Amino acid sequence: MNAQFLIERPQFDAETGTARFAYGLQDKHFVEVLQFPPPAASAAETAAFRKLLDLTAIVLGVSYFKLLAPLEICAPNLTLTDAERAFVIDVYENGLGEFYARNNLLRFGRLSVSAPHDTTTNPALALPDRALLPIGGGKDSLVSVDLLSHVGIAFTPFAVNPKGPILTSVDRIGTQPLYVTRTLDQEMIRLSREPGYYNGHVPSTAINSMIAALCAVLFGYDRIVLSNERSASEGNIVFDGRETNHQYSKSLDFERLLADVLAGATGGALQYFSLLRPYSEARIASFFTRETKFDHVFSSCNRNFRLAGHDGPLWCGQCPKCHFVFLIFAPFMHKDRLLSIFGQNLLDKLENEASFRELSGLAGQKPWECVGEILEAAACLYSLTRHADWHQDAVVKALKADLFRQYGEPALQAALADCLIDSRNHHIPPDLAAKVAAYAV
């Protein structure tokens, strides 16, 4: 393979708030555009913003790199510290791990990054004490809204190319949001559908986090607060000698790596962490049930986030994400309320049995989706076998014997208890962690 992926130095127009990112791959040239609200020119002129713009160019580049997935990444006009170079390799290896696995491409340990060495140290920025909160349209970021509100942290909802449940959720939050428009190069999208080119999953959380970091500097926020739960660190399969995780850029390992890079670029001024890292999906679902105002505006179903848009129901009821969210809500939410949200009982349709088998580890691998831990799903399913509202539903009855046979009731009871125990393995600042823990009892 002789192809080389070229990352050119990005350009930013402070008057219009337009950033342009250019890439080269063989004889192809691509340009991606980010449109921000017009910022203050002084913030755009800082060394921190320039560094973050360069790093954003590298992370956005995964969408174009994967067309051919060459072994060499070149950024001749961008300088990288040793820590930033390690970060780039991580994004292009582990961040694209699912893409490599599903296309059977061996890239781990084989990629090289060519860029000049950076030995400078950026001074600390002065950023206001407030949070930028990415809103994904699902339950998790809305639980973060509740937690931040109750501990008195000022925040602004943030999204890239908001649509569907993101817009309706932000409207219900009632706080002025900050939105960025991202325009992918249409030629890249066309080629990704052509023979001879690859297509597949990219680390969208890494991409959106870098765009959020640019906003933090431009508009003044000293922390980016994610809503990634502890199960995001669990992988799907082992491929090419390494665990491959659909949610890698939501994992704790990546969170810590990116937090260090953002701190280095801003002189320690910008924090990056997930507020929900201590919690299981089930625990987060239990938090969500405390508030009803988001019941009919949120959704985790991927059909709502297609590039071409979607004008159907908020929940398709057919995909693993719909099935998983329904499953973890069922032990904690009144049945009538849950059926009102989804419009149907997903656990009483035998055609869904195979999907629930995968989610709970009774067949196949964990789905390539943002779903929780296998044992957690099994534990929630176990709780339903003992629940008056759910134990007679078709899927629960069909899976009960296999569930008990594979795991045993003592292990399922222990797993269910563990779902409600908060982990200490997180990256939340200690003072905030203590306040949230006191409220989240």
Image (cartoon, rainbow, N blue to C red):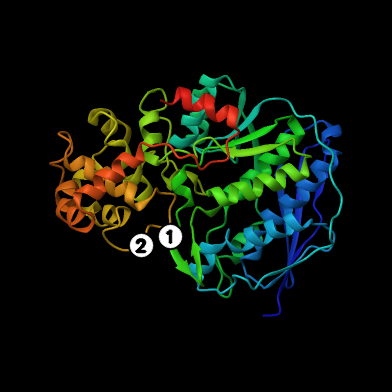
In the rendered image, residue 177, in percent from the top left (x then y), is placed at 61, 28
Q: Amino acid at mark 2?
A: Gln
In this view, the residue in front, 135 or 125, is 125
Q: Residues within 10 Å of mark 2 (few under 14, many from 20)?
A: some
Q: Is residue 238 left or right of residue 112?
A: left
- Tell me which residue sits at (44%, 26%) in the image: 440
Q: Quadrant of residue 337?
A: top left
In the rendered image, residue 224, in percent from the top left (x then y), is placed at 63, 36
Q: Amino acid at mark 1?
A: Asn
In the rendered image, residue 232, in percent from the top left (x then y), is placed at 47, 49
- Tell me which residue sits at (48%, 70%) in the image: 239
Q: Are marks 1 and 2 in contact (CB under 8 Å)?
A: yes
The N terminus lies in quadrant: bottom right
The C terminus lies in quadrant: top left
Residue most extreme to the bottom: 1
Q: Earlier in the sequence, mark 1 or mark 2?
A: 1
Residue identified by numbered label 1 = 236
Secondary structure under the numbered disc 2 in the rendered image: loop
Determine whether 121 is above or below 242 in the image: above
Determine whether 327 is above or below 239 in the image: above
In this view, the residue in front, 249 or 355, is 249
- Tell me which residue sits at (59%, 51%) in the image: 254
Secondary structure under the numbered disc 1 in the rendered image: loop
Residue identified by numbered label 2 = 365
Determine whether 204 is above or below 215 in the image: below
Asked whether residue 36 is in view, the answer is no
Determine whether 34 is above or below 158 in the image: below
Q: Which mark is residue 299?
A: none
